[in-house]
Image (spheres, rainbow, N blue to C red):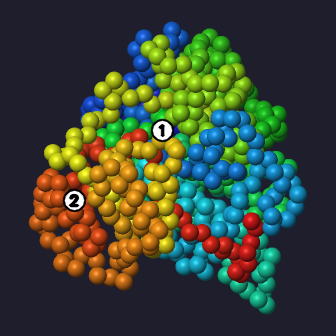
Amino acid sequence: MDEKEVLTRFKNGHLDRAQVAALLTGAGTGKGPVVLTLPEPSAAEAAAEAVGVAAAEPVSGGRPDAAPAAPAGAVAVVGMAGRYPGAPDLAAFWRQARDGHGTASTPPPGRPGEELGHYLERVQDFDPEFFGIDPHEAALMDPQERLFLETAWEALEDAGCTGGRLDALTAADGTPRSVGVFTGAGPGDYALLAARTWSRERPRPMPRGGQWSLPNRLSALLGLTGPSQSVDTAQSSVLVALHLALAALHRGECAAALVGGARLLLHPSSRYPGAGEGVGALLLKPLARALADGDGIHCLVRGSAVGHTAPDPTSPGPGRGSRSAGVRTERAERTERAGGPASAAAPAASAGPAGRVLREALRAAGVGGMDGVVREGAEGVRALVGEAGAATGVAALTRAALQLGQRVPAPGAGRAPGRYPEGEGHGPRRICVGVRGAGGVEAEVVLEEYLPGTAGSPLVPERAAVGPELFLLSAPTPAHLAATARRFADLLGGTGPVPPLDRLARGLRTGRAAMDCRFAAVVGDTGELLGALEEFVREGAPCADLRGGGADPLGLGDVPETDGYLAALWQAGHLHQLRGLWLSGLDVDWAALEPAGGGAAGAALPASAFLRVPLWLGGEEGPA
């Protein structure tokens, strides 16, 4: 780019001073990675972030070697979900990561071959009815796409973002559901399997072979209006996708971003010793918005960088040995040795040209060096997912986010088992996740522990009438509803921690989509709720089923005064009347009735149940 373009980009905030100096002097031309430096927040964002000062900035009185304060405008991970070998959910995945368990095994029954790898179970199973997809069409969908649909939905539910709160994520022009989808996916093995049975004499419908369908299908089904794109840089795909998602969030192209990836070993040519499978998704929001919405926060994303390192730097190529390229490289190395901006306090892991992407990610995050920063990458998840292609990056991100959220380090080089140290002398923990793809594309993402301020998240005022709670569940069919009710009964009747009733009920009201089959109960405590759920599941009591029409028989949804009527009922605590209206099919904007910031932060709720059936090419059973 010429001098005018460099200065224009600097003025717009797309380049920082160090980058401008490097470009104008020729030191960085063609050599530096693409860096995402998070911009300064607006006045409104700064005010919102002040509520959680300790989360946005290192705690005062922290470690003596603490890095400089990170740039404002951090992004929060508010939802996560995944399915990995031997781990149908993230609770099981965390147990494996924490305990250092490996997952290597021979292929599940029904899959040919004996290669030792890391495999998912029942990859042919899918629930088309939940998503409103015709079973014949679903049978032609790549199983990677089907698994990602289910996992993405679970991540949205984990964030409490499938109902009215999803509609409330609006673009600058007011367009609802402004959520971007950024994904990485493995090769199209399913299309290869289908090609074996196709002939001119007996043509048959074929699966789509492009990776574009992975994000586009989700955006179309849920009506998401942000960017929707797939990335293929092999193992680093999902980290590159996250880098693009951060840029889209800070440009205002979307209000939230779903990042994830999937990889399955369906064709025999894809399987080799140590290969692996997996699927995962994370939902990102600007921290200011997450705090205002009362979201639960798994961790923060502080910065990222992407660049290319040739697998073989000595390989021949046009101009590779040119004198100007050598001079610029030598000049950049001299700047680094002299302690230039990009290399201040450069750790050994990031020294030299090979560490430039890591250096830039740390600089973008406002971290002056690797002291106190844990490294995570493909090696850290190899025992869990193997060589998992596009799923490698999302597995590494998830493992790192779980460590920060649980405040427990997983086994790794230089890490002692046990909990992270607590107390005033420690600032937020950071993990730098880095993965390099087979073609040389390297991506680094800096994650940081979320430390709520002493005042905590924004306070949620309670209703004047303190007492019973309105508990709502819905699903696409009565069978789905009963299966989901059983999950909540198991939660309440189990030995694990149970969320407070108010948070549980609020999270379902505001964070879950209202579907056609509905169950509702007004209860005073979790014991009463458990009894109501067990009775519903055991006796098969009728639920409100709106699939045949007849929703909102009085037409209250078309009357402008209804919003005021619902608000009056809510403020007066008339929960039984609200229950009846909701069961009749009236759309209730619970997020508008709840106080500001009335999310379900800290309430880990069971995901909706999927009723999966085997779907494969030509109606065959497919691999297990």
Kindly state the secondary structure of the residue where label 2 is placed.
helix
Q: Residue 453 falls in which quadrant of the image? A: top left
Q: Position of residue 247 (x, y in %)?
A: 47, 42
Residue at which label 1 appears: 298
State whether residue 236 appears in this view: no
Secondary structure under tag 1 reads: loop
Q: Which residue is mark 2?
A: 575
**Figure quadrant of the C terminus:** bottom right
| Left or right, residue 511 beside residue 122 | left
Q: Is residue 271 left or right of residue 184?
A: right
**Which amino acid, mark 2?**
Leu
Seen from this angle, which residue lies furthest top? 64
Viewer-side residue, 8 vs 402: 402
Q: Are marks 1 and 2 in contact (CB under 8 Å)?
A: no
Residue 143 vs 263, above or below: the answer is below
Q: Nearer the viewer, residue 342 or 378?
A: 378
Q: Quadrant of residue 517?
A: bottom left
Work out whether 269 lies above or below 33: below
Residue 27 appears left or right of 274: left
Residue 326 visible in rendering = yes
